[in-house]
Amino acid sequence: MMIGMIPFVLILLAVRFLLLISPWYASWQYQRESFPEDPYGFTVEDRIYWSGVDIEYLQDSSLSIEYFDDFRLDSGEPMHNERELRHMEDVKNLSEGFWFAGRVLILAVVILATLLWNLESPSDVGSLCSPGPGLQ
């Protein structure tokens, strides 16, 4: 069972790591010469700034969707339309769900590893699953 959990733990940790480094990654990507020009006229600095706003929302579990109410373009329009805001909420819910599942799996792996570490011999693994004395 524990062996089956390890790939999921590694994937969930990798997703969390990607979210952690995403401000750096977005900045690096936007500054590459081969990165396409923005069709809406945003500068590289604008793109880095606005991606940082979105990334901060995804990284901070205490922020609600109202966080975006304070951010407006130079024209006064909201940065995100309703469809984009729903998408941001969906992405946040999904990433927080993954992180919760990851913490549960990590805890389970730690508990199972601790139980296995304390066994006298490999043949005692069966005793972890069988009822104790008097419970048979």
Image: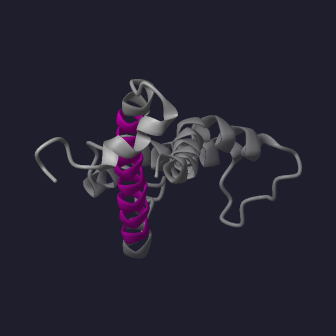
Query: What's the colour scheme?
Result: one colour
Residue at image position (81%, 59%) is 36
Q: Is residue 83 in sight in this rendering?
A: yes
Name the outermost residue toward the right: 34
Residue at image position (69%, 48%) is 43
Is 70 a magenta residue?
no
Looking at the picture, does residue 98 appear above or below residue 56?
below
On screen, residue 123 versus residue 36, left or right, reads left
Name the outermost residue toward the left: 134
Residue at image position (53%, 42%) is 13
Q: Residue 133, located in which quarter of the rendered image?
A: top left
Is 107 a magenta residue?
yes
Residue at image position (48%, 28%) is 121
Count the labels in the image: 0
Using the image as rendered, state which of residue 87 and residue 16 is in the foreground: 16
Name the outermost residue toward the bottom: 83
On screen, residue 11 versus residue 38, left or right, reads left
Q: Position of residue 113 (x, y in %)?
A: 44, 33
Q: Position of residue 8 (x, y in %)?
A: 52, 52
Query: How would you classify the magenta stretch by its main secondary structure?
Result: helix
Q: Is residue 57 in sight in this rendering?
A: no
Using the image as rendered, state which of residue 8 and residue 71 is in the foreground: 8
On screen, residue 88 versus residue 15, left or right, reads left
Q: Position of residue 29 (x, y in %)?
A: 75, 45
Q: Residue 103, located in which quarter of the rendered image?
A: top left
Using the image as rendered, state which of residue 80 and residue 126 is in the foreground: 126
Using the image as rendered, state which of residue 103 and residue 96 is in the foreground: 103
Magenta segment range? 86-112
Q: Position of residue 85 (x, y in %)?
A: 38, 66
On screen, residue 111 versus residue 24, left or right, reads left
